[in-house]
Image: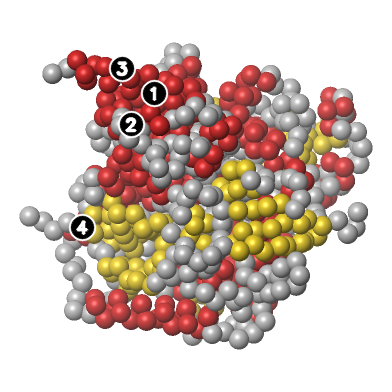
Amino acid sequence: MAKTAKIIIVGGGLAGLSAAIKVAEAGGEVKLFSLVPVKRSHSVCAQGGINSAKNLKGEGDSPWLHFDDTVYGGDFLANQPAVKLMCEMGPDIIDLLDRMGVPFNRTPEGLLDFRRFGGTLFNRTAFAGATTGQQLLYALDEQVRRYEAEGKVKKYEYWEFLSAVIDGKGTCRGICAMDLRSMEVETFAADAVIMATGGIGAIFGKSTNSVVCTGSAQGSLYLQGAAYGNGEMIQVHPTCIPGEDKLRLMSESARGEGGRVWVPKTAGDKRPGKQIPEGERFYFLEEWYPKYGNLVPRDIATRAIHKVVYDQGMGVEGQPMVYLDLSHIDRATLDRKLGGILDIYEKFVGDDPHEVPMKIFPGMHYTMGGLWVDINQQTNIPGLYATGECDYSIHGANRLGANSLLSCIYAGFIAGPHALKYAAGGDAPGADLESALAAEKKRQLGKNDALLNNQGGENPFQLWRELGDTMSKNVTVTRYNDRIAETEKTLLELQERYKKVNLSDKSMWSNQSFLFTRQLENMLHLARVVALGARLRDESRGSHYKPDFPERNDERFLKTTKAFYNSGSNEPRIEWEDVDVSLIKPRPRRYDSK
Amino acid sequence: MANKTVLFKIKRQANPTSEPFWEEFEIAHRPGLNVISLFMEVALKPLTRDGKATTPVNYDSNCLEEVCGSCAMLINGRARMACSALVDNLEQPITIEPFSKFPVVRDLQVDRSVLFENLKTVKAWVPVDGTYALGDGPRQLPQVQEQAYQLSQCMSCCCCMESCPQFNEGTGFVGAATIAQVRLFNMHPTGKVLKDERLAALMGDGGIQECGYAQNCVEACPKEIPLTKSISDVGGDVMKKAVLDFFRL
């Protein structure tokens, strides 16, 4: 009998669970590591839906058109073959999710309903109320629980990934992780490791991401030699609800269902939004982009809002805010299609969006960049795979709404079987496996000791706040090289100050600030990758916008940014890799024509 | 108003076996604060109200949008999510405690794994044949979907269990959340293939019969899931099954 492949999966969101299901189904043995019970992963936050060209609305939609929209929406920075595969797999993935019991919204005939999202002219987005991510995650969580009950999946919840175990040949042989309760550090051997650790929102301080989305795991792997692709490609979502603790997403589905974005025509108009007559409202997206209207892609909508607020001084009540208005749509329709997200607004802001326009503003939302992977989702480190938001592969320079859930599941479905194939490939670990495991454990224990015994007066949460401030200010919507350079200088200073970080809590039982401080080191390294990539890319492409270089420059920059860690100089080194544009010839990306 | 502050006290506990103790904090008021942002303030400046150095508060949290179910705790005595507890709507001093019916891990973190174990026991899943392409799912009327969606929003926060007088070591009651999930999967066109097994799991000690109809669960649920309706529906099914089982050889 062939030996059972042992696969470690890190992260229990959609990507990690999809991979786990594929591995367990094929008879592999899964160890699933997660910071939180997997049912509480960040995928729950996805609201609006999941794209797939099922063409149930008689519009002549097809996977090829979905592919074209995705590549075009990403401003041609994604390698096309993987995107094509994903779009082709889309309809089967939706059917599978439907069979698993996802309560997708239905048409009167009992078929799946679809709605329109940004960056497309087709109704291509299947949805389950306004909590589609939650519903998809639950369906996969349930299937994994079934495998867990059968003994095929073992969960390690409340565990932190610290690093990969890499042997003398440069092959990944397992991971080193820490139990968040007992704080014990352990190593685990595996035939292959699949990362599914999500986005890097916390590097920008406040974002729409969940608390666990720090990018620490990716940062740690980058320091171990993994290549990081297109780090500078960060999506700022146009419609967020600013909050004290985070920015809460107001789904694009609000616009998909007819929500209109506007500001009063008179700057500083003091009247409540509801009292401003139709003729005195400036529907700037509809005016500037008549074909797509309120459903232009996110980067375009975000820049338009910045323009109307900062350049034209027309923000609502003179503040950095614009209206997102649903109050013209009847209550029953809103409740049926958007209930969940409207509840969020009402709960956290106190106003009822059925009655009054919502006040929103752009916020950091999605990490298009990530660990570099090949078409099989394998990183440049053999035996190490990456899937979902933590990989760079699908979305290019800008992600289209409702493509993230699909890309997570797609990547998991690719990585799982390929990891198994790799495991069966016969490159068995050598005699140095035990020593590689022991050496990595020793290195990580050393880091823990150093942190506990650190002297100095720096508060890690203060350093984090400053990191978020400088990254949000200079490395998000509008980028200037001198300001990015200023941020890079700040990052260096923060790294110096990090050496003097002092924990007020040095206990070794469920010490969350210890864990966070450990993550902060990796976050600072990854922030430098993002900033350097942004500074070097002298063009404007998708979410990456430089007023000094307003055009896309395919000749110089139709290339993937690949960042490697240079341990000698302790800084990132960038290589450029050609993008595979073999299927669709790059063309100018414009959404403002009729 | 310049000096307006927020006064709150937190019940803390270093580890599962140590004694709990209270700490009081006072921070400057800002509009839009929620309970989570109070903890963030403490982490930035770990000092109690009387200026004593302390440690950041440990608590479970993730999405901060009331969909992940992590940050459930007792706030002014009520089981609820800390992210959606807005300071301006709370009476001060705000008292913040861990759930009382789950083992404390540290401070406000408790171990709620019992719910996930219960979901295993009742097979809360649709047993699909496989993940390969097997065609469309079953057709469903929008009315059925709407009913299922309501139940499917349960985020396993355990507020219903904390609030339930019957949920305790004496009864071993499974709790409302699990029963509502049984209703959800028994309602699904293919999920119902396991209906009998799910109902069987809810029979006997700790099963659905332990419910005392206090109705606290439905009031505590942050997602307004029809929990009491689910309990009475599933209770009826369990009863029917018991009668049938009795007459079967």
The residue labelled by disc 1 is: B234
From the viewer's perspective, is A305 left or right of A507? right
CB within 8 Å, label 3 to label 4: no
Residue A52 at x, y = what percent?
44, 33
Measured Cα–Cα span from mark 4 to mark 1: 41 Å
CB within 8 Å, label 4 to label 1: no
Residue A248 at x, y = what percent?
65, 46
Tell which tag, 4 or 1, sits nearer the viewer: 1
Chain at tag 1: B
- First-in-chain label (3 vs 1): 1
Measured Cα–Cα span from mark 2 to mark 4: 37 Å
Q: Quadrant of the C terminus of chain B?
A: top left
Measured Cα–Cα span from mark 2 to mark 3: 13 Å
The residue labelled by disc 3 is: B240
Name the residue at 75% across, 43% down. Answer: B89
Chain at tag 3: B
The residue labelled by disc 4 is: A5
CB within 8 Å, label 2 to label 1: yes
Chain at tag 4: A
The residue labelled by disc 2 is: B202
Give SS at disc 4. loop
Q: Nearer the viewer, residue B46 or A573?
A: B46
Measured Cα–Cα span from mark 2 to mark 1: 9 Å
Look at label 4 and name its amino acid. Answer: Ala
The outermost residue toward the left is A1
